[in-house]
Image: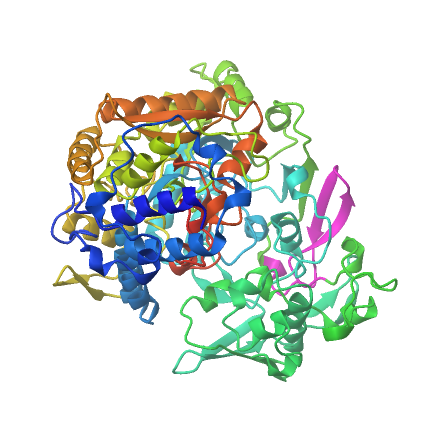
Amino acid sequence: MKKANKVLAMVLSAAMVASLAACGGGSGSTETTAAPAETTTAAAAETTAAPAETTAPAAEDDGTLMADVNTQDAIDVEAESETSDALYDEIFGEYVEHYEKALAVGDQGERLGLMAIAEAKLLETGVVLPYQNNAGNYAISRIIPRFGATVSWGMDGDYRVYKSALIADRILTPDERAAFTAKWSECATADEYIEYVKQWCEENDVTLQNTYTTTYTSGYEPDVWDTLSTNKTAVGGPLSYTWEGLLAYDAKNIQQPALAESWEKSEDGTVYTFHIRLGMQWVTYQGTPITEVKADDWVASVQHAADCGGALSSVISPIVNLDEYVSGEITDFDEVGIKALDDYTLEVTLKEMTPWFETVLGYSAMAPLCREYYTSQGGKFGAEFDSSAADYTYGSDPQHIAYCGPYLISNWTYQNTIAYTKNPYYWNADNVTLDTITYIYNDGTDPLFGWNAFLDGTLNGGIGLGSAALEQAKAVTVPDDPDGKTYFEKYAYVVLEDDTSFLNWVNVNRYAYANFNDESVMRSPQTVTQAERTAAAKLNHNFRMALAYARDRGTSNAASVGEDLKYASLTNSYVPGSFIVAANEFTVDINGTATTFPAGTFYGEVLQAQLTADGYPMKVWDPEGNDGAGASYGFDGWYLPEEAAKCMDAAVEELAAQGIEVSAENPIYLDWCYRDYSTIGAAMDQATKQSIEEALGGRVIINLVSSEGDSNNVSYAAYMGDYGYQFNFDFGGSSGWGPDYGDAQTYLDTMLPTGGMMQNVGLW
């Protein structure tokens, strides 16, 4: 091990055994007892021989920069890995304990409750700090809300939802939209709501349109027309109109039969049997019938996706031997747990009970593939698969795929148009509301392109109001409006619902003090002595909670979206509180008390209950949010400057016991990636610096480490790394996640050691 690494590891290990009792956490809070030195894990013990009381930093700071010492060529990867493992167990051990309990439960309600309890333990570490989602913007729309599924899993984006879109011939007011949402909540079934919408239109002289025109950008231009070959949204989204899944969600977010007319599963939950509808047709892009849809088309699709590298296989990896086939461990696809028992019976066998498996059956990973058409285009399977073969034309363009979905691609012109027409052979064609759907390319050079096209009727759905369009909406008066209202005053509403979660992180095991790809940029100003003090502070629980409560996310956000929307995109939990709802009554143990929750309980309610029981003051669930439906977003439940000061006082006392004096005269320095390539980004970062330093009384100083005017430098500092030792910041970052299926596991798995998120905190 290199000398500098050993010094840093000694500080890290010493801090691990310090008292971790958090202010704001009661007797049930995580890490509430001081660990004696002898209980340090073996991995950590190997990196330090000094007990905690002998690890005070050097009295003299000779000015040596950590960026000159902890270089990428000096890293001892094996030692860093050992330290990483020990720290993960120390910090996230209670989270893993509760999460493993949740994974072992099949009952939907109880599983939801146990997952929420596990997330409470995750948030209580102070390492993972919720920040924002992708929503929180103004919009104007003619599209009637809740016409289709609003779940954010099991589908490729929002594309396929639009087959059942209900689009008015005039712009809807916010009050009308709210009334529709309220009625949607009242209706017992999707059909009941759709009938209500049609009746409302008749009573209010509104005509539903049968076409839809919107825009797309270069980020949604397919480079291949084979949805099974990649997990790119730019491919999966546009192609999702062309196929149908076994099941589909309706407007009430309830799964209904689609290409499977019925299904059942075994008592142990590992074998699913799907009964395929009879008489459904595969057709060409011109609508010419090819052959009947059969059970074998799903066997072909899973094998083809695996042959293409398995990009989509993660969401269907519970299928027996699928991972082994993708990795090459087995080569006979007959050993994979998907079989056509006959032409209309499909059997899928899972390795173990997987409660969320049904939620992915409308996702592209389970899109059918017409075996007959695929082989006619040069397609082969297994070892013979070769997408570069001269005779392989499948997916080369929209004319070289087979269709079984609601639409056919009638026109594709690169960076110009993607147009769809209704498929007359689609099994449910009578309920497809739009005859045509057209996407017009927007190259982004004209910030008012969408606004102008919306006003002249070219775009007949809705538009988000970016800064330029928002300015116009606030200035332009609605024609013939008796009150002279502007478009903003009369029609603008805030888009709130979104299930993405972006997080800030405390890098508890930092190694890099310059970018791993170019060590001349994003260089930390911290000396070795300062970095050692910072490393010890970050491993103090109270210090981390102080940071969490000290960041004024709303004021930072206001620099980007203005005062009116500063809270709109803020989220307060990792798994969105309304993401899943209990289908049944359930009972879970909260700090020794058996607590029963009724059917209809939101995930966020249990999460809040556990945090409150543990004595933590943050608010992660608002039962009155989202127009009374309940939400974990749209407010700042973490900015608690008084709590921040209390936690900082406790941290100062605990660090002093380790021989580390912290004061306004001798502060802890934290590096934050400074987005000075952007006026807005810089203003947001300045606001963050100000709120933290003010709340913590100057005992923490945020170093805004310059990007040197290049956004790529920030990406390499806080996002692009593959290993924890490549992440170059102390606090910040903004990696996020969106769901792949309808279970909290889709988020919480990412916080396991191999889950893909731990690199952000220096672990791997």
Query: Does the magenta segment cover residue 410?
Result: yes
* Residue ID at (39%, 27%): 557
Give the answer, above or below, for where 594 lies relative to 222. Answer: below
Identity of the residue furthest to the right in this view: 390
Query: Does the magenta segment cover residue 720?
Result: no
Residue 59 point in image, percent of width and height: 27, 30
| Quarter assignment of residue 458 | top right
Give the answer, above or below, for where 746 lies relative to 684. Answer: below
Whether residue 438 is visible to the viewer of this picture, yes or no, is: yes
Residue 109 point in image, percent of width and height: 29, 65
* Residue ID at (57%, 65%): 313
Please name whichever residue, 218 or 713, is drawn nearer the observer in this view of the structure.
Answer: 713
Please name whichever residue, 565 or 158, is drawn nearer the observer in this view of the structure.
Answer: 565
* Residue ID at (28%, 38%): 537
Residue 292 point in image, percent of width and height: 71, 74
Identity of the residue furthest to the bottom in this view: 341
Please name whichever residue, 435 or 706, is drawn nearer the observer in this view of the structure.
Answer: 706
Q: Which residues are magenta?
A: 403-430
| Quarter assignment of residue 569 | top left
Whether residue 206 is visible to the viewer of this picture, yes or no, is: no
Residue 173 point in image, percent of width and height: 43, 30
Apparent side of residue 502 relative to residue 519 in the rendered image (left or right)? left
